[in-house]
Structure formats: C-alpha cells, structure tokens
Amino acid sequence: MIYDALSSRRDDGKRGIIRSVRELPESLRRQARFFLWASLAGLALRLFLVFRFPAIVNDSRLYADIADNWLRHGIYGITNCGIIMPTLSRLPGYPAFLAAIFTIFGADNFRAVLLVQVLFDLATCFLVADMARRLFSERAAKAAFLLAALCPFLANYAAAALTETLEIFFTALALDLAFCGLKIGESNPSTRFSWKPFLGCGLAIGAAILLRPDGGMLLAVVGGYLCWLLFRSWRSPRFTAFFCLTPRALILAGILVALGALAPLIPWTVRNLRTLHRFEPLAPRYANDADEPVKSGFNRWTKTWTADYVSVEEIYWNVPGEDIDVTRLPRRAFDSTQQRDLTRELFAEYNHSHDMPPELDQRFAALAAERIHAAPFRYYAELPLLRIADMWLRPRTELFPSDPRWWEFNDDRRWLAVSLAFGAINLAYVLMGAAGLLRARAFFGIGLFVLFLLLRSGFLGTLENPEPRYTLEMYPVVIVLASRLFHRLA
C-alpha cells in the first residue's frame, strides 16, 4: 500500500510537471528552442576551430612554462637554460587557469584548455544577450546571442591558448553586473541598494586585470560612469528618482567596485615585493623582467611611422633575434633621403648581430626625436588614429596562415577568400554597432558603453604594436549595440 501510494504521488508529480510545461506560453518555449539551437551552432563553430585550427603560439608556451613551474616546483617563473627564474613579466591569471586545467586533465593538455575556453566563450554569449535584454528587449537579446554565438572572431580566439577568451568573458561579466547593480532593465526597480552586483562587478574587473594589465581600464570606465551619475544626481534630484540610486548609494557602489577590483592584486604585489624586491602591482609595460633591457628608443622610433598590423609582423616582432628588411618599411618611415640612408645603416648594424645594444637603441631614439620634432601632429594625432582604424577594420585572420598583405591579392586563393570574407564580416559588425549606437543614444546605460569604447580605443592608439585582437574586448559592446537594430523588427 505504501508503495502504491508513493507510485501514485510520483505519477501525479510527473503529470503536474507535464501540465506545467504545457501551460508555458508558446513564446517561452520558442525562445528556449532558439537559444538551444543557437548554442549548438556556436558550439559547432568553436569545436571546428579547436580541432581544425588550434593556435598554440609562443606566448601559449610561455604561459604553460610558468604554470608547470608553479605546479611542480612552487616557483612562479620561467625556465632559462634549465634554470627556473622567478618572473613578473606575466600576470598570474592565465597561468593559474592553465595550472588548474593541467592539474585536472594532465600536464600541457592544451586541447583541454581550448575546450574549457569554448565553454567560457559560450557563457559570454549569454552575458551579451542579458545586456541586450536589459537595455533593449527580448528580441534584441536573441539577436545579440546569435551574433555572438556565430561571431567567427570570438570563436577563433576560443581556439587559441591566449588570454583573450577569458578577458572577454570577464569584461562582459563586469559590464552586465554593472547594469544589474544600476537596475537597468528591471520592470519595477526597488529603491533598496543591492551591494552584491557591484562587488561582483569589481571582482570580475579584478579577474580581468589579473589576465591582462589593460583590464584596469574597466575600473576607470565603471568608476567614471558612477562619478558621472553621482554628478547628475547632485544636480538633479529627479534624475535620482529616475534610476533609483541615491548619491550615497552611488558612492558605496564605487567603493565596492574598487575594493573588488584591487583586492585580488594584493597577493601578487606582495609576492613581487618579497621575491623580486619590486613594487609591481601589475606587470611591466613591455612584459619584461628586471634583468631584461627595454628597447625604448627603437619602440619610440617605431611609433613615428607604424600604422598597421603588417609592420608589427614584419618589423616589430623581429627585434631582437631576426633580420629586419628596410624595404618593408612604408614611405612614411622617412622624411628625407638622409633619414632613409641613416635607417638603412641602423638596420644593417642590427642585422649584423640581431641584438639591440644601448648604443644602437639611443641612435634610434635620436632619429625618433628628429621625426617627432619635424611632425608632432603626425606622431600625436594622425598615426594613433590610423592605428585605431587598422585595429578595428583589418580582417581578423592573424591566427590563420593568411598573408597579412591581403590587399596585394597574391595569397593562396583559399586564404585570400578567408581574408576578404573576414574583412567583410568584421566591417558588417562594426557598421551595425555604429548604427545601433546612433539609435540607442536615449537609452539609460549607453554612456557606460560609449566611455568604454572611447577610453580603450584611445589607449590602443598609443601602442606601437597595433594588433587587431586588442579590440576584441570591445566586441561584446559592439554586438549589444548592433542588437538595437533588431529591437523593433517583427
């Protein structure tokens, strides 16, 4: 009898669940099917790239070396001639991630690393969809999810053992939690302050910083936006009533974000003080250790003419260690015949030893000073803008064997087609994002996106190595803005 009673209750429970599912609105069931099929499509794209075009590059091996030494010897360092040297050239976020994967799945198991990154990248798609839902609508959220799931550039870096996928995930997480804390997208927002989203936002920013130093710009962006809201609140009490956070709550939110972002850096800073006797809360500008010289003169000279990724591959990355070809320099690298002759002389001297001693570096610095003095506008405005445009608009095929000089149309036909297709897709995403931004100006919260795009793009323009991957952290924002175009479409 007891068994019959339990069976009856279990059957009633099953019938109740079935009845509840049947009573769900058809629109919700359609949405569930949509997200399921879109997720499977995104997963298929990423798995194809993982198994067909995995990218294990020199930086990947460097991170893995640090992770292995950390696991096996308890030393956060790199192996040099069989000796493990403590290092601060790389922040501990990605080596810690690799160490965790290697512990579970085996040493140097990069395939497992890439598969886990695929899961993080798919999670980013859901964060992007949630931001679009909060800002615009459910329809925009579905469009954002599909655009993110099928984005070949995000998927491409999920198949690369580099920091980008995790950095993009934590960037999207920080922005989404900021929206949550500001109660953006809530139909009936309460006036009660919720501290958890802001602390979570700060911790996500801290994770982004531990992966790459430029993740710190997220702290400046969120903090700057909160300061702007605070200023608006003081000037207009009605504005405070509009988004339900008082000036006191905004100040507390800023403190929580800062604490969450900076607290994870304390162990790293203490370690650098105790082990290497250097106060270094992040990582050096050029990812060098204390005993590694920085070719500052050569770097500054490079910034007087470089405007595209091709120069990074052909010139910048070759120093030191490999030949550099003066014929690969663009015309803008010379202001006169005398400069051309001097540059040829400097290149010949470098190619003789493949080294950049201080004396040679100083001669590059002198040449850079001469060029900057002759054309300051070019150095401080024109070239940074060109580098920003190149990073945003270049075909993102750097992980493929495509020729970076795609416009010369002398590459293998298959890879030339990939370059052209990726260029067209990237242009479409950027144009949709720009169009969505123009239509979304009146939406509360867009200012956070605008500040992020402006600050990060401006920073990237100051680099001498304009790599397209550096703009990928902004792609979740681009996709959310692009989803605005689908906000009212039937």
Image (cartoon, grey):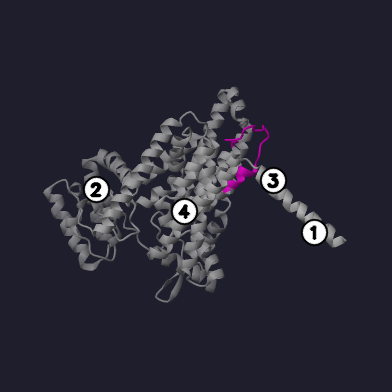
Find disc 1 in the rendering and name its residue. Answer: 7
Question: Which circle's residue, 2 or 3, is located before the other in the chain?
Answer: 3
Of marks 2 and 3, the one in the foreground = 3
User: Can residue 394 be spotted in the picture?
Assistant: no
Q: Which residues are magenta?
A: 182-202
Report which residue position mark 4 lands on.
Answer: 42
Q: Earlier in the sequence, mark 2 or mark 4?
A: 4
Q: Name the quarter where the N terminus is drawn.
A: bottom right
Can residue 484 be spotted in the picture?
yes
Circle 3 SS class: helix
Q: Residue furthest left?
A: 337
Cα separation between marks 1 and 2 = 79 Å
In this view, the residue in front, 170 or 79, is 170
Residue type at mark 3: give it: Ser
- The residue that label 3 is drawn on is 20
Badge 4, how many Cα within 10 Å: few under 14, some, many 20+? Answer: many
Which mark's residue is nearer the viewer, 4 or 3? 3
Task: Give the residue number, with chain letter if any, for mark 2.
Answer: 305
Mark 3 and mark 1 lie on one chain; the one further toward the N terminus is: 1
